[in-house]
Amino acid sequence: MEFPWGITNPVRQFQLLYCLWLSLAMLRNGRQHYRFYRWFYSSDLGLATKRGLGAHPSRIYGIFTPPILSPAQLAAAGVAFTGCLLAACLPLAPRVFLFLAYLLYFLYFPQMFAEATLSGHGSILIPSMLFLLACSPSLDHEVQSRSEWPLTLIRIYLASGYFSSGMCKLLCGARFGKFWGMGPTLQYYIFDALWSRPAGPTVRRIQETAITAPRIMTFLATSSMFFEIGFISAPFSDMMSVFFGLNGLAFHAGIMLFQVLPMPSHPRLPPTNRTTHRSPPTARRLARRASTSARGGRRRCSRSSSACRRRSRGARSSTAGSSSRTSSCRRRSTRRCRC
């Protein structure tokens, strides 16, 4: 790959592209992050008292609890994080600035765990990538090395994440007796997106079509699970790396399309309106259908139970041999009644 300024070290090339990309994302979204955090910090929500990594905030490496920063401190941490990423692109001590950016990540991002575009696993790969690059001696200006072992480690790290996700789906399905790759899994995800993350009319029509096609959802869910499991073979072959890399882009593009994740418009939505939007037509129809079905089930159950009680009262006034009919009637009522 031809790179400006005569840089031929592949690790340095990757590090420059990665740091510049993160810096661009921070410069583009930093103001929206600050607006969200200023509201979140001053809100009376119970979540506002928590800090951590992931959608359900947890401690850093399960040990360290991140501090709660004020909005001004968050802005300063974001500026310092972006500055370290840009400084790592200079020839002077890039590994030092990469390590500082690694530390500053744990100041900035745990404050934003409730923000839609940064929660969950959206940004969880950043610290490990920065740490692996900071440990790469080939980034030192004095070391004339073309070793690619940091890139190999990054490949293995990414592949292990996909593999563990796929195996978790497979093993949890075996544990609870429910195959994760069945259509209702993705139908539920899309149904949840219809309610909680409303999209535009075009995306909504695609979601409405998908949610009523369980066979297509079964195919996509099963393919996604085995794609994640098979990703473990990607680090050991350049051809497999390209294949799984392209499929990974399609995989995440599908998530963005069907589940509206991440939702870039979130920071521009008034926080109080996130749960007050009108549900889309398909969600209302499906909810109405489910409610009608549930009411019908309760009516059938109550009728069968009433009939059973009448037969039971008649059985008690008859001979002793009718006790077996009473017990069987109760068993039939129990089988029919699942309320």
Image (spheres, grey):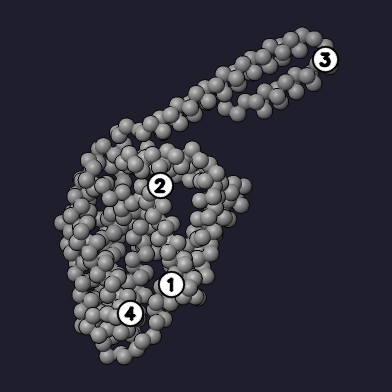
Identify which residue is drawn at 26% across, 37% down: 273
Q: Which mark is residue 320?
A: 3
CB under 8 Å between discs 1 and 4: no
- Give the crowd class for mark 2: few <14, some 14-19, many >=20 residues within 10 Å: many
**Which residue lies under the disc numbered 1?**
155
Q: Is residue 59 left or right of residue 27?
A: right
Residue 181 vs 159, above or below: the answer is: above
The total number of labels drawn is 4
Q: Which badge, 2 or 4, is on the more N-terminal residue?
A: 4
Q: Which mark is residue 1?
A: 4
Q: Which badge, 2 or 3, is on the more N-terminal residue?
A: 2
Q: Is residue 63 visible?
A: no
Residue 15 vs 209, above or below: the answer is: below
- Pinpoint residue 278: horizontal percent, then vertical percent: 32, 32
Q: Which badge, 3 or 1, is on the more N-terminal residue?
A: 1
Secondary structure at badge 3 equals helix
Q: Nearer the viewer, mark 3 or mark 1?
A: 1
Tell me the quarter of the picture where residue 196 sits: top left
Q: CA distance from mark 2 to mark 1?
A: 27 Å
**In front here: 256 or 123?**
256
- Pinpoint residue 313: horizontal percent, then vertical percent: 71, 11
- Residue kind at label 3, given as amino acid type: Ala
